[in-house]
Image (cartoon, rainbow, N blue to C red):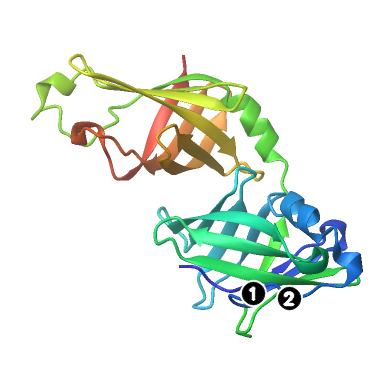
């Protein structure tokens, strides 16, 4: 799913261009600050554009080194996760390295600097455009999300009629201000508890759950007002009875 990029942003007058996979190029002496500048500002918003086949595209760079690539529209866009890192190169140059977490394929984008432009240079000159959108809902949603939330509807896909012990099934999240979370789920017979860390995207549209077992779940934050919350995601669990496909989960604050 990895595509070539042309990234444009008005933020600090910087522009980014990525045309395909390439090795880093030598840089001019004045480019010694490229690496920290690139690492700081890639997560500063959401990158929107159109893919080569005409699909709507958004890319979110999280500060923990995870990049979320969303392609398509509707209730379930195609989502891929990458690890991203800015690598210093020769003469102060930097390049962006992205690794597909599913396949392990790594893409390197070389960087060159000219005036107020940063270009990620490659050998393939096909490209499409992405524009960085700054939004302020992320911090507001981080504050509203803090606390304990209980699911208000039956959360799983195993029928309660076929599995009477699921009558009292539950799903809860506890989001703490320090960026950690705990998920509790189960029924009268079995109780499961999972923990990890979370990040809210700057536009406030996504929550990235990184579990202590290294599993990562991308959650669409569909609604959040006062004591009401709607999350959309796939619930993965070691017990199939508590696993689901992609669906909406409705919560009230506990």
Name the mark on residue 23: 1
123 and 136: which one is in front? 123
Residue for badge 2: 25
Q: Position of residue 175 (x, y in %)?
A: 53, 23
Q: Position of residue 148 (x, y in %)?
A: 49, 18
Vertical comparison of 159 with 148: above or below: below
Q: Is residue 31 toward the left or the right of residue 143 in the image?
A: right
Please report contact status of discs 1 and 2: CB closer than 8 Å, yes or no: yes
Q: Quadrant of residue 186?
A: top left
Q: Is residue 16 toward the left or the right of residue 224 in the image?
A: right
| Residue positioned 52% across, 31% down in the render | 197
Number of labelled discs? 2
Q: Residue furthest front?
A: 90
Q: Secondary structure at mark 2?
A: loop
Looking at the rendered image, the quarter that the N terminus falls into is bottom left
| Residue positioned 46% across, 14% down in the render | 254
| Residue positioned 58% across, 37% down in the render | 199
Q: Quadrant of residue 90?
A: bottom right
Q: Position of residue 88 (x, y in %)?
A: 73, 60
């Amino acid at each position: 799913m990895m595509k070539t990029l042309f990234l444009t942003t008005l933020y600090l007058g910087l522009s980014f261009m990525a045309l395909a996979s390439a090795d880093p190029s030598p840089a001019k002496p004045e480019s010694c600050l490229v690496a920290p500048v690139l690492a700081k500002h890639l997560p500063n918003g959401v990158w929107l554009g159109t893919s080569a086949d005409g699909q709507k595209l958004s890319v979110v760079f999280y500060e923990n080194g995870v990049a979320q690539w969303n392609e398509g529209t509707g209730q379930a866009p195609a989502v891929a996760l990458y690890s991203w890192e800015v690598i210093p190169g020769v003469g102060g140059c930097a390049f962006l390295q992205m690794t597909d977490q599913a396949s392990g394929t790594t893409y390197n984008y070389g960087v060159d600097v000219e005036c107020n432009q940063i270009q990620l240079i490659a050998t393939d000159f096909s490209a499409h455009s992405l524009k960085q959108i700054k939004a302020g809902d992320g911090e507001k949603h981080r504050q509203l999300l803090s606390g304990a939330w209980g699911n208000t509807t039956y959360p799983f896909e195993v029928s309660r009629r076929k599995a009477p012990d699921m009558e009292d099934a539950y799903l809860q999240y506890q989001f703490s201000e320090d960026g950690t979370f705990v998920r509790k789920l189960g029924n009268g017979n079995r109780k499961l508890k999972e923990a990890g860390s979370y990040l809210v995207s700057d536009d406030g549209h996504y929550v990235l759950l990184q579990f202590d077992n290294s599993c990562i779940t991308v959650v669409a934050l569909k609604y959040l007002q006062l004591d009401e919350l709607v999350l959309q995601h796939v619930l993965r669990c070691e017990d199939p009875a508590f696993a689901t496909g992609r669906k909406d989960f409705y919560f009230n604050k506990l």
